Image (cartoon, rainbow, N blue to C red):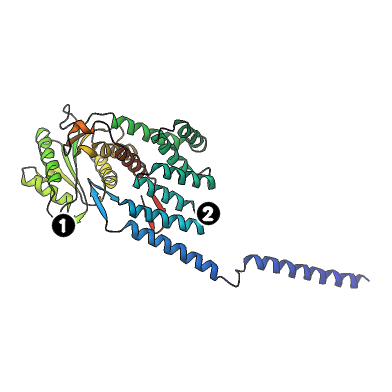
Protein backbone atom coordinates (compact mmCIF):
# COMPACT_ATOMS: atom_id res chain seq x y z
CA UNK A 1 0.00 0.00 0.00
CA UNK A 2 2.75 2.36 0.87
CA UNK A 3 4.52 1.58 -2.39
CA UNK A 4 1.35 2.23 -4.41
CA UNK A 5 0.69 5.53 -2.62
CA UNK A 6 4.28 6.58 -3.13
CA UNK A 7 4.08 5.84 -6.85
CA UNK A 8 0.80 7.70 -7.18
CA UNK A 9 2.22 10.68 -5.35
CA UNK A 10 5.31 10.69 -7.54
CA UNK A 11 3.24 10.59 -10.74
CA UNK A 12 1.09 13.40 -9.39
CA UNK A 13 4.14 15.51 -8.65
CA UNK A 14 5.56 14.90 -12.11
CA UNK A 15 2.25 15.91 -13.67
CA UNK A 16 2.25 19.01 -11.47
CA UNK A 17 5.79 19.87 -12.51
CA UNK A 18 4.90 19.31 -16.15
CA UNK A 19 1.92 21.60 -15.79
CA UNK A 20 4.03 24.23 -14.07
CA UNK A 21 6.67 24.00 -16.79
CA UNK A 22 4.06 24.50 -19.50
CA UNK A 23 2.65 27.55 -17.72
CA UNK A 24 6.08 28.98 -17.15
CA UNK A 25 7.11 28.10 -20.67
CA UNK A 26 4.04 29.88 -22.03
CA UNK A 27 5.10 32.98 -20.14
CA UNK A 28 8.57 33.15 -21.68
CA UNK A 29 7.93 31.81 -25.17
CA UNK A 30 7.10 34.49 -27.73
CA UNK A 31 3.91 34.04 -29.71
CA UNK A 32 4.25 32.00 -32.88
CA UNK A 33 2.98 34.87 -35.05
CA UNK A 34 5.18 37.91 -34.38
CA UNK A 35 4.34 39.71 -37.61
CA UNK A 36 1.94 42.22 -35.99
CA UNK A 37 4.60 43.18 -33.44
CA UNK A 38 7.36 43.56 -36.02
CA UNK A 39 5.02 45.61 -38.21
CA UNK A 40 4.21 47.95 -35.31
CA UNK A 41 7.91 48.47 -34.54
CA UNK A 42 8.61 49.12 -38.20
CA UNK A 43 5.75 51.60 -38.38
CA UNK A 44 7.01 53.53 -35.32
CA UNK A 45 10.56 53.56 -36.67
CA UNK A 46 9.29 54.89 -39.99
CA UNK A 47 7.22 57.62 -38.33
CA UNK A 48 10.19 58.76 -36.22
CA UNK A 49 12.44 58.77 -39.28
CA UNK A 50 9.86 60.93 -41.07
CA UNK A 51 9.83 63.31 -38.09
CA UNK A 52 13.62 63.57 -38.20
CA UNK A 53 13.59 64.25 -41.95
CA UNK A 54 11.04 67.03 -41.48
CA UNK A 55 13.08 68.45 -38.61
CA UNK A 56 16.26 68.45 -40.68
CA UNK A 57 14.64 69.73 -43.88
CA UNK A 58 16.58 72.57 -45.59
CA UNK A 59 13.79 75.07 -44.98
CA UNK A 60 15.60 76.42 -41.93
CA UNK A 61 16.53 80.00 -41.31
CA UNK A 62 19.35 81.18 -39.06
CA UNK A 63 18.33 83.95 -36.68
CA UNK A 64 21.19 85.40 -34.65
CA UNK A 65 22.74 82.11 -33.70
CA UNK A 66 19.79 79.78 -33.18
CA UNK A 67 17.92 77.78 -35.78
CA UNK A 68 14.18 77.86 -36.18
CA UNK A 69 12.11 75.35 -38.16
CA UNK A 70 9.24 76.54 -40.33
CA UNK A 71 5.74 76.01 -38.86
CA UNK A 72 4.81 73.47 -41.54
CA UNK A 73 7.85 71.37 -40.71
CA UNK A 74 7.00 71.47 -37.04
CA UNK A 75 3.43 70.37 -37.69
CA UNK A 76 4.80 67.41 -39.65
CA UNK A 77 7.17 66.60 -36.79
CA UNK A 78 4.29 66.75 -34.29
CA UNK A 79 1.98 64.68 -36.48
CA UNK A 80 4.51 61.90 -36.96
CA UNK A 81 5.33 61.78 -33.25
CA UNK A 82 1.67 61.60 -32.26
CA UNK A 83 0.97 58.84 -34.78
CA UNK A 84 3.85 56.91 -33.26
CA UNK A 85 2.37 57.51 -29.80
CA UNK A 86 -0.96 56.00 -30.91
CA UNK A 87 0.91 52.79 -31.68
CA UNK A 88 3.04 52.90 -28.50
CA UNK A 89 0.89 54.68 -25.88
CA UNK A 90 3.41 54.05 -23.07
CA UNK A 91 6.00 56.25 -24.84
CA UNK A 92 5.62 59.54 -22.99
CA UNK A 93 8.87 60.66 -24.62
CA UNK A 94 6.91 60.96 -27.87
CA UNK A 95 4.40 63.31 -26.25
CA UNK A 96 7.17 65.42 -24.68
CA UNK A 97 8.93 65.71 -28.05
CA UNK A 98 5.65 66.64 -29.77
CA UNK A 99 4.90 69.24 -27.10
CA UNK A 100 8.30 70.85 -27.56
CA UNK A 101 7.84 70.91 -31.33
CA UNK A 102 4.78 73.06 -30.64
CA UNK A 103 6.85 75.28 -28.33
CA UNK A 104 9.22 75.86 -31.24
CA UNK A 105 6.23 76.70 -33.41
CA UNK A 106 4.97 79.14 -30.77
CA UNK A 107 1.76 77.29 -29.89
CA UNK A 108 2.18 77.14 -26.11
CA UNK A 109 -1.44 76.19 -25.48
CA UNK A 110 -1.18 73.04 -27.56
CA UNK A 111 2.17 72.25 -25.95
CA UNK A 112 0.60 72.49 -22.49
CA UNK A 113 -2.19 70.13 -23.61
CA UNK A 114 0.37 67.58 -24.79
CA UNK A 115 2.47 67.89 -21.62
CA UNK A 116 -0.75 67.41 -19.61
CA UNK A 117 -1.57 64.30 -21.66
CA UNK A 118 1.89 62.95 -20.85
CA UNK A 119 1.40 63.77 -17.17
CA UNK A 120 -1.78 61.67 -17.09
CA UNK A 121 0.42 58.67 -17.94
CA UNK A 122 3.36 59.64 -15.70
CA UNK A 123 2.08 61.98 -12.95
CA UNK A 124 5.36 61.93 -11.00
CA UNK A 125 7.71 62.64 -13.91
CA UNK A 126 9.84 65.61 -12.78
CA UNK A 127 10.62 66.75 -16.33
CA UNK A 128 6.93 66.96 -17.22
CA UNK A 129 6.25 68.79 -13.97
CA UNK A 130 9.11 71.19 -14.78
CA UNK A 131 7.81 71.94 -18.26
CA UNK A 132 4.28 72.52 -17.02
CA UNK A 133 5.45 74.78 -14.18
CA UNK A 134 7.38 76.96 -16.64
CA UNK A 135 4.86 77.15 -19.45
CA UNK A 136 1.85 77.65 -17.18
CA UNK A 137 3.81 80.50 -15.60
CA UNK A 138 4.53 81.89 -19.08
CA UNK A 139 0.81 81.87 -19.89
CA UNK A 140 -0.01 83.64 -16.63
CA UNK A 141 -1.83 80.59 -15.25
CA UNK A 142 -0.38 81.15 -11.78
CA UNK A 143 -2.55 78.67 -9.91
CA UNK A 144 -1.60 75.87 -12.30
CA UNK A 145 2.07 76.80 -12.19
CA UNK A 146 2.05 76.85 -8.37
CA UNK A 147 0.32 73.46 -8.36
CA UNK A 148 3.03 71.94 -10.53
CA UNK A 149 5.78 73.57 -8.45
CA UNK A 150 4.27 72.22 -5.22
CA UNK A 151 4.19 68.68 -6.63
CA UNK A 152 7.75 69.12 -7.88
CA UNK A 153 8.89 70.31 -4.44
CA UNK A 154 7.38 67.22 -2.82
CA UNK A 155 9.16 64.87 -5.23
CA UNK A 156 12.44 66.67 -5.87
CA UNK A 157 13.10 69.89 -3.91
CA UNK A 158 16.35 70.51 -5.78
CA UNK A 159 14.61 70.51 -9.16
CA UNK A 160 11.88 72.79 -7.84
CA UNK A 161 14.51 75.27 -6.65
CA UNK A 162 16.26 75.11 -10.02
CA UNK A 163 13.06 75.80 -11.97
CA UNK A 164 12.28 78.71 -9.67
CA UNK A 165 15.81 80.03 -10.27
CA UNK A 166 15.34 79.80 -14.05
CA UNK A 167 12.03 81.70 -13.92
CA UNK A 168 13.58 84.36 -11.66
CA UNK A 169 16.58 84.70 -13.99
CA UNK A 170 14.31 85.33 -16.97
CA UNK A 171 12.32 87.90 -15.00
CA UNK A 172 15.54 89.65 -13.93
CA UNK A 173 17.08 89.80 -17.41
CA UNK A 174 14.00 91.03 -19.26
CA UNK A 175 13.69 93.88 -16.74
CA UNK A 176 17.15 95.24 -17.66
CA UNK A 177 17.02 98.10 -20.22
CA UNK A 178 18.68 97.43 -23.56
CA UNK A 179 21.79 99.53 -24.21
CA UNK A 180 24.42 100.09 -26.88
CA UNK A 181 27.34 100.71 -24.49
CA UNK A 182 28.10 99.58 -20.91
CA UNK A 183 26.85 101.83 -18.14
CA UNK A 184 30.17 101.56 -16.31
CA UNK A 185 33.63 100.00 -16.48
CA UNK A 186 34.51 96.89 -14.51
CA UNK A 187 37.67 95.82 -12.69
CA UNK A 188 38.88 92.30 -12.07
CA UNK A 189 39.00 89.54 -14.67
CA UNK A 190 36.76 90.68 -17.49
CA UNK A 191 35.70 89.20 -20.82
CA UNK A 192 33.94 90.40 -23.96
CA UNK A 193 31.81 87.76 -25.69
CA UNK A 194 30.83 88.39 -29.30
CA UNK A 195 28.04 86.17 -30.63
CA UNK A 196 28.33 84.91 -34.19
CA UNK A 197 25.89 85.23 -37.03
CA UNK A 198 25.52 82.97 -40.09
CA UNK A 199 28.01 83.81 -42.82
CA UNK A 200 27.17 83.94 -46.52
CA UNK A 201 27.53 80.81 -48.66
CA UNK A 202 30.82 82.13 -50.06
CA UNK A 203 32.24 82.34 -46.55
CA UNK A 204 32.05 86.13 -46.14
CA UNK A 205 30.55 87.76 -43.08
CA UNK A 206 27.13 89.39 -42.99
CA UNK A 207 26.74 93.10 -42.29
CA UNK A 208 25.06 92.20 -38.98
CA UNK A 209 28.13 90.31 -37.81
CA UNK A 210 30.48 93.09 -38.92
CA UNK A 211 28.44 95.56 -36.85
CA UNK A 212 28.82 93.30 -33.82
CA UNK A 213 32.57 93.13 -34.42
CA UNK A 214 32.87 96.91 -34.65
CA UNK A 215 31.16 97.21 -31.26
CA UNK A 216 33.41 94.46 -29.87
CA UNK A 217 36.48 96.31 -31.14
CA UNK A 218 35.37 99.52 -29.41
CA UNK A 219 34.87 97.67 -26.13
CA UNK A 220 38.20 95.86 -26.48
CA UNK A 221 40.02 99.16 -26.91
CA UNK A 222 38.30 100.57 -23.82
CA UNK A 223 39.26 97.49 -21.76
CA UNK A 224 42.73 96.47 -22.99
CA UNK A 225 43.10 93.67 -20.43
CA UNK A 226 39.78 91.98 -21.24
CA UNK A 227 39.74 88.52 -22.78
CA UNK A 228 37.81 88.45 -26.06
CA UNK A 229 35.72 85.38 -26.86
CA UNK A 230 34.24 84.91 -30.33
CA UNK A 231 31.71 82.12 -30.68
CA UNK A 232 30.11 80.47 -33.70
CA UNK A 233 30.96 77.10 -35.19
CA UNK A 234 28.78 76.84 -38.31
CA UNK A 235 31.19 76.54 -41.26
CA UNK A 236 30.80 78.06 -44.71
CA UNK A 237 33.45 77.71 -47.39
CA UNK A 238 35.82 76.03 -44.89
CA UNK A 239 35.66 78.83 -42.28
CA UNK A 240 33.60 79.01 -39.11
CA UNK A 241 32.02 82.25 -37.95
CA UNK A 242 34.43 82.52 -35.03
CA UNK A 243 37.49 82.07 -37.25
CA UNK A 244 36.27 84.88 -39.52
CA UNK A 245 35.57 87.03 -36.46
CA UNK A 246 39.00 86.44 -34.96
CA UNK A 247 40.70 87.27 -38.27
CA UNK A 248 38.72 90.52 -38.53
CA UNK A 249 39.67 91.61 -35.00
CA UNK A 250 43.34 90.79 -35.57
CA UNK A 251 43.28 92.73 -38.83
CA UNK A 252 41.94 95.72 -36.86
CA UNK A 253 44.69 95.68 -34.27
CA UNK A 254 43.63 93.24 -31.57
CA UNK A 255 46.41 90.92 -30.38
CA UNK A 256 45.66 87.27 -31.18
CA UNK A 257 46.77 86.42 -27.63
CA UNK A 258 43.63 88.14 -26.30
CA UNK A 259 41.24 86.17 -28.51
CA UNK A 260 39.66 82.82 -27.69
CA UNK A 261 37.75 81.11 -30.50
CA UNK A 262 34.79 78.81 -29.97
CA UNK A 263 34.67 76.99 -33.30
CA UNK A 264 32.10 74.39 -32.30
CA UNK A 265 28.87 76.04 -31.16
CA UNK A 266 26.02 75.73 -33.65
CA UNK A 267 23.51 77.76 -31.64
CA UNK A 268 23.32 80.26 -28.80
CA UNK A 269 22.53 77.35 -26.48
CA UNK A 270 25.82 75.67 -27.38
CA UNK A 271 27.70 78.99 -27.23
CA UNK A 272 26.51 79.51 -23.66
CA UNK A 273 27.48 75.98 -22.66
CA UNK A 274 30.91 75.99 -24.27
CA UNK A 275 31.87 79.54 -23.33
CA UNK A 276 30.86 78.99 -19.70
CA UNK A 277 33.80 76.60 -19.32
CA UNK A 278 36.14 79.19 -20.82
CA UNK A 279 34.87 81.76 -18.31
CA UNK A 280 35.39 79.30 -15.46
CA UNK A 281 38.90 78.43 -16.62
CA UNK A 282 39.92 82.10 -16.73
CA UNK A 283 38.11 82.89 -13.45
CA UNK A 284 36.14 85.69 -15.09
CA UNK A 285 34.32 88.06 -12.71
CA UNK A 286 32.44 90.05 -15.34
CA UNK A 287 31.54 89.49 -18.99
CA UNK A 288 29.92 91.79 -21.54
CA UNK A 289 27.90 90.02 -24.24
CA UNK A 290 27.73 91.63 -27.68
CA UNK A 291 24.65 90.71 -29.70
CA UNK A 292 21.86 92.23 -31.75
CA UNK A 293 19.34 94.15 -29.65
CA UNK A 294 16.46 91.80 -30.45
CA UNK A 295 18.48 88.83 -29.10
CA UNK A 296 20.34 90.49 -26.22
CA UNK A 297 17.97 89.30 -23.50
CA UNK A 298 17.94 85.80 -24.97
CA UNK A 299 21.72 85.40 -24.93
CA UNK A 300 22.23 86.97 -21.50
CA UNK A 301 19.68 84.60 -19.94
CA UNK A 302 21.40 81.57 -21.45
CA UNK A 303 24.87 82.66 -20.35
CA UNK A 304 23.55 83.41 -16.86
CA UNK A 305 22.08 79.92 -16.52
CA UNK A 306 25.06 78.12 -18.06
CA UNK A 307 27.53 79.83 -15.73
CA UNK A 308 25.23 79.32 -12.75
CA UNK A 309 25.65 75.59 -13.40
CA UNK A 310 29.36 75.44 -14.32
CA UNK A 311 30.76 78.40 -12.39
CA UNK A 312 32.26 80.64 -11.50
CA UNK A 313 29.22 81.33 -9.34
CA UNK A 314 28.44 85.01 -9.01
CA UNK A 315 29.84 86.06 -12.39
CA UNK A 316 28.21 89.32 -13.50
CA UNK A 317 26.91 89.56 -17.06
CA UNK A 318 25.70 92.55 -18.98
CA UNK A 319 24.76 93.00 -22.62
CA UNK A 320 25.41 95.66 -25.22
CA UNK A 321 23.47 95.70 -28.43
CA UNK A 322 23.84 96.43 -32.09
CA UNK A 323 20.73 98.28 -33.19
CA UNK A 324 19.26 96.26 -36.01
CA UNK A 325 15.98 97.80 -34.87
CA UNK A 326 15.51 100.93 -32.74
CA UNK A 327 15.78 100.08 -29.05
CA UNK A 328 12.61 102.06 -28.39
CA UNK A 329 10.46 99.43 -30.15
CA UNK A 330 12.17 96.56 -28.30
CA UNK A 331 11.58 97.83 -24.75
CA UNK A 332 9.00 95.12 -24.05
CA UNK A 333 9.93 91.63 -25.27
CA UNK A 334 7.49 90.05 -27.68
CA UNK A 335 5.80 86.71 -27.01
CA UNK A 336 8.04 85.13 -29.65
CA UNK A 337 11.15 86.43 -27.89
CA UNK A 338 9.93 85.27 -24.48
CA UNK A 339 9.12 81.80 -25.80
CA UNK A 340 12.62 81.45 -27.23
CA UNK A 341 14.14 82.65 -23.94
CA UNK A 342 12.22 80.17 -21.77
CA UNK A 343 12.62 77.33 -24.29
CA UNK A 344 16.39 77.71 -24.60
CA UNK A 345 16.87 78.40 -20.90
CA UNK A 346 15.44 74.94 -20.25
CA UNK A 347 17.70 73.46 -22.92
CA UNK A 348 20.80 75.04 -21.38
CA UNK A 349 19.70 73.69 -18.00
CA UNK A 350 19.67 70.21 -19.51
CA UNK A 351 16.05 69.45 -20.42
CA UNK A 352 16.13 67.98 -23.91
CA UNK A 353 13.52 69.33 -26.30
CA UNK A 354 13.44 66.18 -28.43
CA UNK A 355 13.97 62.84 -26.73
CA UNK A 356 12.61 60.25 -29.17
CA UNK A 357 15.46 58.55 -31.03
CA UNK A 358 16.50 59.23 -33.77
CA UNK A 359 14.97 62.68 -33.14
CA UNK A 360 17.07 63.43 -30.07
CA UNK A 361 18.33 66.94 -29.36
CA UNK A 362 19.02 69.06 -26.32
- The N terminus sits in image quarter: bottom right
Q: Quadrant of residue 6?
A: bottom right
Residue closest to the far top? 184
Residue 51 percent location from the top left of the image: 38, 58
Of mark 1 and mark 2, the one earlier in the sequence is 2
Residue depicted at x 31% and y 42%: 340
* Residue that carries the numbered disc 1 in the rendered image: 201
40 lies above or below 307: below
107 lies above or below 18: above
Left or right: 176 as drawn, with respect to 39? left
* SS at mark 1 in the image: loop
CB within 8 Å, label 1 to label 2: no
118 lies above or below 38: above
Left or right: 61 as drawn, with respect to 84? left
Residue depicted at x 46% and y 46%: 114
Q: Is residue 27 visible?
A: yes
Residue 161 percent location from the top left of the image: 43, 34
Residue depicted at x 47% and y 34%: 144
* SS at mark 2 in the image: loop
Q: Quadrant of residue 21?
A: bottom right
Q: CA distance from mark 1 to mark 2?
A: 44 Å
Left or right: 288 as drawn, with respect to 359? left
Residue 273 percent location from the top left of the image: 29, 45
Q: Is residue 356 visible?
A: no
Residue depicted at x 44% and y 33%: 141
60 lies above or below 315: below
* Residue that carries the numbered disc 2 in the rendered image: 90
| In the foreground, 339 or 352 | 339
| In the foreground, 214 or 178 | 178
Amino acid sequence: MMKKNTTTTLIGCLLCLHSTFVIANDLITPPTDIKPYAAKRQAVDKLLTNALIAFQAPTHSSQAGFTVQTPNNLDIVTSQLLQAYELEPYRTDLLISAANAQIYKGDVNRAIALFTQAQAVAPDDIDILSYLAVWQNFKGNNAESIKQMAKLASLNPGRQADIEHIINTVDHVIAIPLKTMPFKTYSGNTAIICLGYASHSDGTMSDILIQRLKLTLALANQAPKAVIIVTGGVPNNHNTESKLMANWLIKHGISPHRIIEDNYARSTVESALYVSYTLARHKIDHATIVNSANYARHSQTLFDIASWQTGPRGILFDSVSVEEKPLSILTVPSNKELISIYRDALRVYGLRSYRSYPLDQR
